[in-house]
Image (cartoon, helix red, strand yellow):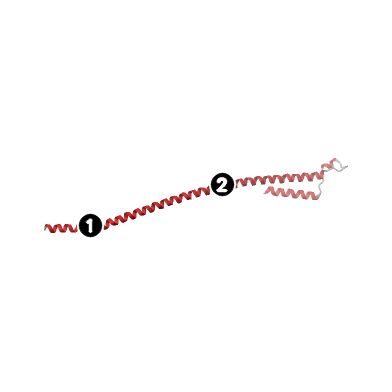
Amino acid sequence: MASSDSSTATLPLAPKKENVTPIGSKIAELNESRTELLSRIQGLKQDLQGWRSKLDTQVKIYRDELSELKKSLNVEVVQLRTEFQELKNTLQQQQEDVTASLRNLGLQDSPGDDAKEAQEPNVDAEDQEVLASVEEDIEKKDEN
């Protein structure tokens, strides 16, 4: 009976060894698969970090370019305003010169005229129209 007890005791051990071998190979496969997946994840993380770094660099470059463009445009706007103001001043000076010239034309003394007549400008209708037109143009430009 002792031999039958020992044969029964060995029978259950044999099937466990057979089951252990496939489980060991499965564990090895799973470990290998896990290692591959971790390696791929690490590679993807590195790719993502590289992509983010490139994107950050590109964003910085674009911001710097936009900042430079903004500065350049602001300088141009200031220059245009200055030029416009100079043009406006020139036009006003020309208007004043034309007005003075028209007055001087009317103030020229003829021999034999008295002083009172010389003080009053003698501007004909055509000169008055030109003067009025110039003054209107300047007023319109001042309004703008």
Earlier residue among tags 2 and 1? 1
Q: Which of 136 and 25 is in front in this view?
A: 25
Image side of residue 4 versus residue 46, left or right: left
In the image, which disc is placed on residue 68? Answer: 2
Q: Which of 3 and 81 is in front in this view?
A: 3
* Location of residue 137 in the rendering, given as x and y in whole percent from the top left corner: 72, 49
Which element type, helix, strand or loop, lies under badge 1? helix
Q: Residues within 10 Å of mark 2 (few under 14, many from 20)?
A: few
**Which amino acid does the dot numbered 2 rest on?**
Glu
* Location of residue 115 in the rendering, given as x and y in whole percent from the top left corner: 85, 40
In the image, which disc is placed on residue 74? Answer: none
**Which amino acid does the dot numbered 1 rest on?**
Lys
Give the residue at the far left of this rendering.
1
Image side of residue 118 versus residue 89, left or right: right
* Location of residue 99 in the rendering, given as x and y in whole percent from the top left corner: 76, 45
In the image, which disc is placed on residue 17? Answer: 1
Q: Which of 140 and 63 is in front in this view?
A: 63
Q: In which quarter of the image is the N terminus?
A: bottom left
